[in-house]
Amino acid sequence: MSVIAGQISRVSGPVVQAKGMEGIKIRDLVQVGQLGLMGEVIEIKGDLASIQVYEETDGLTVGEPVSSEGIPFLVELGPGLIGSIYDGIQRPLEVISEQTGAFIRRGTTADPLPRERRWPFEPTVAVGGRVGPGDIIGTVQESSTVLHKIMVPEGVNGVIAEIKGGEYTIEEPVAQLEDGQELFLRQRCPIRRPRPYLEKIAASIPLVTGQRIFDVLFPVTKGGSAIIPGPFGSGKTVTQQTLAKWSDADIVIYVGCGERGNEMTEVLTEFPQLEDPRSGEPLMNRTILIANTSNMPVAARETSIYTGITFAEYYRDMGYDVALFADSTSRWAEALREISGRLEEIPGEEGYPPYLASRIASFYERSGRVRCLSSADQNGQQDQAREGSVTVIGAVSPPGGDFSEPVTQNSLRIAGTFWGLDAQLAYSRHFPAINWLTSYSLYLDALKNWYDQELSEEFLQMRAELLEILQREDELAKTVQLVGRESLSDPDKLLLQIARTIRDDFLRQSAFHEIEAYCPLQKQFYMMKAILSFYQHCRGLLGKRPYAEIEARPGWEQLARMRYFENEDFAPKYEQLLKELVADGGAVQQGVSQDQ
């Protein structure tokens, strides 16, 4: 492979210009300076190449060498990814910390995957079988909860001439084709180009998060996309971390893109100690962390998003449901703005590059549910059973909480679910601080059949009733501010009371309580049904009992305690609770039916 060599002619922050780079291509990986700093070509003018450098450029001087082998930035994919902590350019931070200490020295590199570790490989194809891109040739038990499927890389196909089970390192071939090509446990993949698949299919299964406001009011599908915009202090990072801990995805990838170091420290110290609620194993057994904090080089921050989505697509191609959490895409956009300014490009709205919208769209469009790439198997039948998904959930940090700024608006055009954080809710200690009046989900129609079959045909109807009560409460709140609560009719007073129960006892949820941190979907359904049943019961009492007596009923306190019922075997407790809530006998039941 020929090496393209040039020398530095100009340094401008993270952007370095090199001359004598004839033959270089956009997105080629380069080594800059005496230290061999990693960078990527982002602009070419004649023999001049502009390079975004992934490390600090302090100390670089004009005339230092620049070289490239003419290949793009590739991430290494294979066993060993799960449980790892990387920076934006896939340097293993735990390994590097052992070499350099707490701070990474410039030019420091380390192998992304362990070279000495031997993995137990079990073949799933036999000698003589024809394989092509995406076909699974064997498996490796990567962690106690993840079975890593070894796939044929893109562009490779042929007939298996030799394959044998045993323990291998990632650099030892596990199979050989008749034309002499060798297959390994690892493969390398460019990050800027989406991994191929056979076809995208409709996403119709919800990503269950265990958080009631998301699962009931504003769900996202496995293979969908969601954004969480919010002002400083409204709980974006905590919300994303909570979703990463409790969502029912097979694989979790958390990208800390430009966030404060103390927030990433919480993730790095807390995640290894968490227990996976699905398996009882450590959560890190199905998690990959990418840490690119605000004090790290800006160019690597821009790359970290693509590194994370490529990891996600890799496990998607094995047939897994993957959830990618990007915190925050605003910091990524700011990196694009800084690099664009260094290139002296014409700025767009608020100084962002004019291609901001297309970059955001291309990122979120890499989400989706797909039929995974594979060729004909040994029987000549297409493998149609392997499906996987990537769900992308991105936090947005609009300056001053202004949702009209470009990053939020361009994200809104693409994402299917909008979880709008509200500073007033956060300051009143209501978490998750999601504003139920401005948030929305576009996936309800796609999920209807799943809800009908797995929960109840009543589910979406009850959800609509909850939202209607909350919207009506917002309208009544304006009247209360003008003339006071006592001027309202009894039905309106009752509506305000049940709305308060919905807000405080259903939508509010503690991320630190032993039981409340995670609420199973079945329990959410029962809680919602209990609240609405009690509301209908109390409406039946209006006109038959004084309103003060209705307001003093013990059922309100019982509803408040309901969320602290143990998550296991909730149904019998709910049935007993419902009997206690409507314990007034036949006259009350008659009143309910007349009211309805």
Image (cartoon, helix red, strand yellow):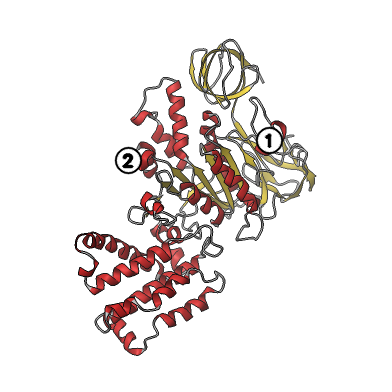
| Left-right relation of 340 to 122 | left
Give me the C-alpha separation between circle 1 and circle 2.
41 Å
Which of the 4 quarters of the picture holds residue 217? bottom left
Nearest the camera: 309 or 152? 309
Q: Residue 97 carries which label?
A: 1
| Left-right relation of 309 to 137 | left
| Residue 92 place in picture, x, y as percent | 66, 37
Give the vertical position of 191 relative to 345 (above or below).
below
Badges 1 and 2: C-beta atoms under 8 Å apart?
A: no
The amino acid type found where label 2 is placed reads: Ser
Which of the 4 quarters of the picture holds residue 586? bottom left
Nearest the camera: 283 or 71? 283
Q: Which secondary structure lies at badge 1?
A: helix
Q: Which secondary structure lies at badge 2?
A: loop
Residue that carries the numbered disc 2 in the rendered image:
404
| Residue 556 place in picture, x, y as percent | 39, 74
Kindly identify the residue that appears in the image at 47 percent across and 69 percent down: 455
| Residue 224 place in picture, x, y as percent | 46, 50
